[in-house]
Amino acid sequence: MSRQPAFGIALSTLVLASGLMTSPIPGHSSTKQTTDNLPLSISSSEVATSTTFQTTALEKSVFDQINRYRAAKKLPKLKLNANITRQARIHSQNMARGKVPFSHQGFERRVTVIPLRFNSAAENVAFNQGYSNPASEAVTGWLESPGHLKNIKGDYDLTGIGVAANKQGEVYLTQIFLHSTNNGSTIARIKNAVKGTRN
């Protein structure tokens, strides 16, 4: 009786949804949405041996990496905001649970329920599976994508990051960026502006 060797192939996947951004037009109440419709796939030799991740540690890692990048480019560091983080976590959890597709679906609602005044907002999302450091893989992918990089380098001062993983080892990451302001009813302006730019 002969034995055949057993082997397996580990595949790591990273998918980035296009960066979504809203920004005001000077003197107007409208916003511009920038999206690219093609997801990016990036392969890596770093394969996770466990599917258990400390999501808060991953959130901190994303925050630190993004701020290191901004500081290296002479941009002001972002401040972490608990209200923004809460919305980012909810979105990542909903994607991980399959309640919403991997996308920016619900972006307008997410940012308008944040109890802060702001004049622009943006969001980056990533999904990956099989990486030992999913936060670094997501940030690397964002930095290599023009749309995501534009959000990272944007004129924002506040951010929130949410990470969620499911039993299949899929890790979903959401980062929301805001430029805070004290002028007028920003929430109403953003709501009206986003509605006016849909195609």
Image (spheres, helix red, strand yellow):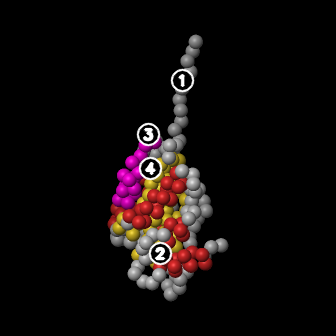
Disc 2, disc 3: CB below 8 Å? Answer: no
* Cα distance between the residues tagged 1 and 3: 23 Å
Q: Which residue is mark 4?
A: 134
* Residue extending furthest toward the bottom: 27
Of marks 1 and 3, the one in the foreground: 3
Instruction: Decide which of tag 1 and tag 3 comes sooner along the chain.
Output: 1
Magenta residues, dominant SS class: helix
Of marks 2 and 4, the one in the foreground: 2
| Residue drawn at the location 62% of the way across and 73% of the way down | 198
Quadrant where the C terminus is found in the figure: bottom right
- Coordinates of residue 99 in the picture (x, y in percent): 57, 54
Q: Which residues are magenta?
A: 50-64
Of marks 4 and 3, the one in the foreground: 3
* Cα distance between the residues tagged 2 and 1: 57 Å
Amino acid type at circle 3 is Ser
Q: Which residue is mark 1?
A: 5
Q: Which residue is mark 3?
A: 50
Report whether residue 65 is seen: no
* Cα distance between the residues tagged 2 and 4: 28 Å
Q: Which residue is mark 2?
A: 120
Assess disc 1: are there few (<14), some (14-19) or many (≥20) residues with their C-alpha within 10 Å of its C-alpha: few
* Residue extending furthest toward the right: 199
Instruction: Decide which of tag 4 and tag 3 comes sooner along the chain.
Output: 3
**Magenta residue check for 61:** yes
- Coordinates of residue 173 in the picture (x, y in percent): 47, 56
Amino acid type at circle 1 is Pro
Assess disc 2: are there few (<14), some (14-19) or many (≥20) residues with their C-alpha within 10 Å of its C-alpha: many
Instruction: Decide which of tag 2 and tag 3 comes sooner along the chain.
Output: 3
Element marked by disc 4: helix
- Coordinates of residue 76 in the picture (x, y in percent): 35, 71
* Cα distance between the residues tagged 2 and 3: 38 Å
Element marked by disc 3: loop
